[in-house]
Amino acid sequence: MRWKIGLFGGAVSALMIAGALSVTAPAQAACWASDPVNATTADQAARAMQQAGYSQVQVYEKGCDSAWHAHALLNGSPVNVVWNRDGQILTEGD
């Protein structure tokens, strides 16, 4: 009987540890091998965004869809901006 209680306690402890690790681990977006990839660079993305009227462009990520994401200012207001694979410069979200 004691071994059953020990086994149960160990299983509960393992589940609690696994749950704590999954909460603290950052989420990662998965890219597929079939996702389209282009050869654009962060510098090219920043220049394109600046030419579209954004200032203080800070590129931080290229998505799985080859879209470059950045923080920038537009008319003095902070915005998130994306340069997508179609060459469009768009303000993201709110």
Image (cartoon, helix red, strand yellow):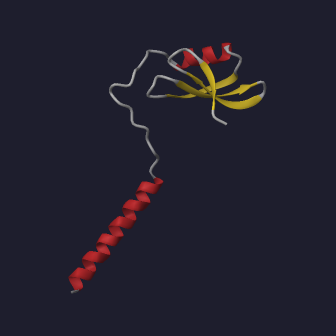
Q: Looking at the rendering, in which quadrant would you find the C terminus?
A: top right
Q: Horizontal placement of 82 versus 65: left or right? A: right
The location of residue 9, given as percent across then percent down, is 31, 76
The residue at the far right in this view is: 76
Q: Which of the 4 quarters of the picture holds residue 57? A: top right
Q: Which of the 4 quarters of the picture holds residue 58? A: top right
The location of residue 71, given as percent across then percent down, is 64, 30
| 31 over 27 or under it: above or below | above
Q: Looking at the rendering, in which quadrant would you find the N terminus?
A: bottom left
Q: Nearer the viewer, residue 34 or 14?
A: 34
Q: Which of the 4 quarters of the picture holds residue 76? A: top right
| 71 over 14 or under it: above or below | above
Q: Nearer the viewer, residue 81 or 56?
A: 81
The residue at the far bottom in this view is: 1
Who's the residue at 38% across and 32% down the image? 31
Who's the residue at 55% across and 14% down the image? 87
Q: So how many labels did they put on this image?
A: 0
Who's the residue at 34% across and 25% down the image? 34
The location of residue 52, given as percent across then percent down, is 67, 15
The location of residue 10, given as percent across then percent down, is 30, 73
Who's the residue at 46% across and 56% down the image? 23
